[in-house]
Amino acid sequence: MTLYRMALRQQFVSWIVWAIVIALGVGTVASAAPAVANSRALVALMGSLPASWRGVMGGALMTQRPLDGYLYVKLVMYLPLLVGIFSGFQASSLLAREMEHRRFDFLLGMPLTRERLLISRFLALATAQAALWAVTIGALLAFLAQQGLHGDVVGYLLVGYSGFLVTLVTSAGALWASALARDYPTAARWGLGIAAVPFVYDLTVRIATVAQGWRYILPYGYYDPPHLLLSHAFPWLETAVLVAVSVVLTCGALRSFARREV
């Protein structure tokens, strides 16, 4: 638990900065929500768009619930990317920066296994991610309530949970990259790429409306807020797949870190 608390403290300042930035963005988007809550113009616009763009913009969600469709297009679609960038950079620093600055020498000189050290740090990062998602979804519902709108509490809790699973994979992949990278700048670039490249790929595939099955080779394919908000169905399949991938990536990071000379 001591290692876990130490890792949480190391991430605290970065977490505060990201939480404030995301909360401000949420407030900005939510401030315009009353104007579109019952907008027929959005529904008419959706009907005039090609099928590919209707899918990207939420499809049935936009036509049936314009408010949630607006929030999806303006904010919710991008949340895994924003939290994923935070996770990627933080995971990159868990190993690469510490090894570059030779901060592990003392810790590894103690009766402490590398596996325990790495798992404690990764659990702290997962906790920080979950807290960031909780703040984001809580801020969204609070800002909507302030505007006199009743947000879909169950739906957005499911969206936050689904997004957390995606960013968990992001951080596990960045952790493995950090264990393999020779220096921190390289690890940070990999962390950013692991968050951003799959998002761009998923968006491209959805716009192209071809080979949709290829979306599911990357974690963003399992993030589907329109479906969750309309159905309130718990994402069992997404949970099983993304947790399994996170475990595999974390095990890869453990093996790579065990072989590294520190």
Image (cartoon, helix red, strand yellow):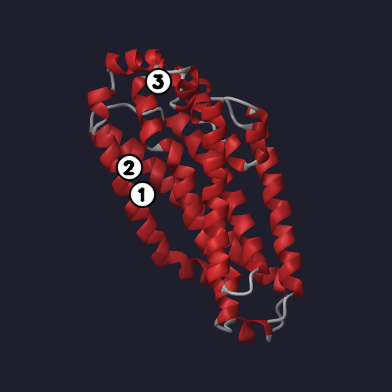
Secondary structure beneath dot 1 equals helix
The answer to whether one can see residue 4 in this image is: no
> Seen in the image, is 170 located left or right of residue 150?
right
The residue singled out by tag 1 in the image is 22
Q: Depth check: 133 or 212 in front?
A: 212
Q: Which mark, residue 26?
A: 2
Q: Is residue 29 above or below residue 109?
A: above
The image quarter containing residue 258 is: bottom right
The residue singled out by tag 3 in the image is 62
Rendered location of residue 201, percent (x, y)? 56, 40
Q: Is residue 81 above or below residue 90?
A: above
Rendered location of residue 106, percent (x, y)? 62, 86
Q: Residue at x 49, y 35 (%)?
A: 159
Q: Residue at x 68, y 86 (%)?
A: 109
For mark 1, does the 10 Å Cα neighbourhood hold few (<14), some (14 to 19), or many (20 or more) residues? many
Tell whether label 2 touches label 3 (CB within 8 Å): no
Q: Earlier in the sequence, mark 3 or mark 2?
A: 2
Image quarter in which the N terminus is found: bottom right
